[in-house]
Image: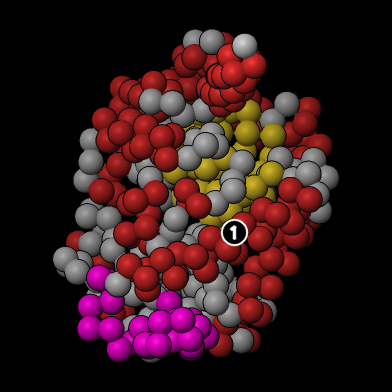
C-alpha cells in the first residue's frame, strides 16, 4: 500500500509538472530597440501597435534608464518588457575597448577587437578573462535592478560563428567545409593555460582541434558557467533570465560553441531563421520540437519576418511552432511587418491566443 502511494505521488507530480510546462498560454512577442532617447509619444504609438497584433511581450534593447521609462507605459497595455542585452559581443563598448586583453582570441592569435570576423560589429569578449566576465555580470546587474522588468534577455552569449549558415557563406565569399582558424575562438592565453593545467597540452598545438571533444567542451563550459552565474544572481533578486539562442542545442554546439541545454534558463528563444540555413518552413517545426525535447524550460520560437513575407508562410511558421510544443513565438521584428503579415497576427490573435 505504501509503495502504491509513493508511485501515485511521483506520477501525479510528474503529470503536474508536465501540465504546467504545456499549459502556459501561447504568446506573441517581438524584439525591438529603444533608440538613444526616450520618446513618450513614439512609445505610446508603438505599444498600441503591438497590442493590436496581440503582442504581449517585448524584448527591448536599450539603456536601463529608457527601459525604466518604457515599463509604466507598457504596463497600461499589459505588455511585459524584457531587457535585451548583448552579452559577449560588445561593439562600441567604451570600457571594454580600453582593455584589449579582455577579447576572445582566434587560432591565428588575433583578438576579436583587432580582427573582426565577418562584420565590423563582431567584437567578442572572452568568457575566460575574469575582468571581462565581471564587466558582463555588472551589465546584467544593471538590468536585474530594474523594477518591473520581466527578464534579463541575453543575446550573443556564445563565440563568433565558427561555421556560418549555408545561405550566409556566399554573402561573405567564404566556403566553410571545415573549421577555419580565423573563425575558431577562444585561444585566449588564460584559456590555453587553464586547459594545459588539466590536459598537459596546449590547444594551439592540436593538429585537428575540431576533433577534440575536450577542447570543445572546455569552451562550452566557460560560456555556460557565465550564464548560470548571471542566472543565480538574477534569481536571488526574483528576476528571470531568458536568452536568444541558436536553433537547437546540438546545432548550437557545433556552429557557435553554445550549449544552452546546460543553462538554468527560465525561457529560451531559439532563433529559427530558416533562410539562413537554406531550409523550408517545416524545418521550423523540427527545430522547435528538438529544442522542446532537449530542455525542461519553455521554448519561444524566434521567427525572421523578412524570410516570411508571404503571409501563408508566416501563418504556417506560427502554427507549426505551436504544434511542436513552443509556448509562443517572437518575431524579428514586428516593426517592419508588411500589411499582409500584420493581418496574419490579427487573425491568429483571435484564434490561437484565445485557446
Please name the residue that numbered disc 1 is placed on.
Answer: 227
Q: Is residue 133 magenta?
A: no
Residue 116, image x and y in percent?
A: 41, 77
Quadrant containing the N terminus is top right
**Res 46 → quadrant:** top right
Quadrant containing the C terminus is top right
Q: Which residue does the image show at 52% across and 28% down from the upper left? A: 327
15 relative to 83 in the view: left or right: left
Residue 20, image x and y in percent?
A: 60, 23
Q: Mark 1 falls on what kind of element? A: helix
Please, what is the dominant secondary structure of the magenta stretch? helix
Residue 67 visible within the image? no
66 relative to 131 in the view: left or right: right
Q: Is residue 346 above or below residue 60?
A: above
Q: Which residue does the image show at 35% across and 28% down from the upper left? A: 317
In this orientation, which residue lies closer to the viewer: 106 or 349? 106
Q: Is residue 197 magenta?
A: yes
**Res 230 → quadrant:** bottom right
Residue 348 visible within the image? yes
Residue 122, image x and y in percent?
A: 45, 70
Q: Which residue does the image show at 44% across and 43% down from the upper left? A: 270
Residue 217, image x and y in percent?
A: 41, 66
Q: Which residue does the image show at 37% across and 71% down from the upper left? A: 214
Q: Which residues are magenta?
A: 186-211
Q: Is residue 243 above or below residue 156?
A: above
Amino acid at each position: 500500500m505504501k509503495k502504491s502511494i509513493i508511485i501515485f505521488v511521483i506520477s501525479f507530480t510528474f503529470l503536474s509538472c508536465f501540465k504546467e510546462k504545456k499549459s502556459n498560454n501561447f504568446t506573441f512577442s517581438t524584439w525591438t530597440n529603444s533608440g538613444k532617447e526616450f520618446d513618450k509619444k513614439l512609445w505610446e504609438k508603438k505599444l498600441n501597435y503591438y497590442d493590436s497584433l496581440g503582442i504581449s511581450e517585448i524584448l527591448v534593447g536599450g539603456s536601463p534608464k529608457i527601459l525604466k521609462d518604457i515599463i509604466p507605459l507598457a504596463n497600461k497595455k499589459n505588455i511585459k518588457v524584457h531587457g535585451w542585452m548583448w552579452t559577449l559581443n560588445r561593439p562600441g563598448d567604451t570600457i571594454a575597448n580600453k582593455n584589449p586583453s579582455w577579447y576572445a582570441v582566434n587560432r591565428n592569435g588575433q583578438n576579436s577587437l583587432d580582427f573582426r570576423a565577418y562584420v565590423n560589429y563582431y567584437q567578442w569578449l572572452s568568457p575566460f578573462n575574469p575582468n571581462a566576465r565581471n564587466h558582463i555580470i555588472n551589465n546584467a546587474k544593471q538590468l536585474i535592478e530594474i523594477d518591473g522588468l520581466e527578464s534579463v534577455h541575453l543575446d550573443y552569449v556564445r563565440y563568433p560563428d565558427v561555421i556560418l549558415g549555408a545561405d550566409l557563406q556566399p554573402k561573405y565569399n567564404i566556403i566553410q567545409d571545415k573549421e577555419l582558424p580565423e573563425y575558431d575562438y577562444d585561444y585566449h592565453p588564460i584559456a590555453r593555460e587553464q586547459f594545459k593545467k588539466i590536459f598537459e597540452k596546449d590547444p594551439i598545438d592540436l593538429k585537428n582541434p575540431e576533433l577534440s571533444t575536450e577542447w570543445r567542451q572546455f569552451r562550452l563550459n566557460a560560456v555556460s558557467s557565465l550564464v548560470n552565474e548571471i542566472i543565480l544572481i538574477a534569481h536571488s533578486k526574483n528576476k528571470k533570465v531568458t536568452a536568444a539562442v541558436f536553433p537547437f542545442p546540438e546545432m548550437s554546439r557545433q556552429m557557435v560553441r553554445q550549449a544552452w541545454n546546460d543553462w538554468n534558463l527560465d525561457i529560451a528563444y531559439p532563433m529559427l531563421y530558416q533562410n539562413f540555413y537554406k531550409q523550408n518552413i517545416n524545418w521550423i517545426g523540427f527545430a522547435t520540437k528538438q529544442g522542446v525535447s532537449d530542455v525542461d524550460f519553455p521554448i519561444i520560437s524566434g521567427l525572421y519576418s523578412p524570410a516570411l513575407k508571404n503571409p501563408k508562410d508566416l501563418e504556417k511558421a506560427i502554427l507549426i511552432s505551436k504544434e511542436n510544443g513552443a509556448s509562443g513565438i517572437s518575431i524579428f521584428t514586428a516593426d517592419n511587418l508588411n500589411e499582409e503579415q500584420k493581418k496574419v497576427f490579427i487573425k491568429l490573435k483571435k484564434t490561437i491566443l484565445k485557446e
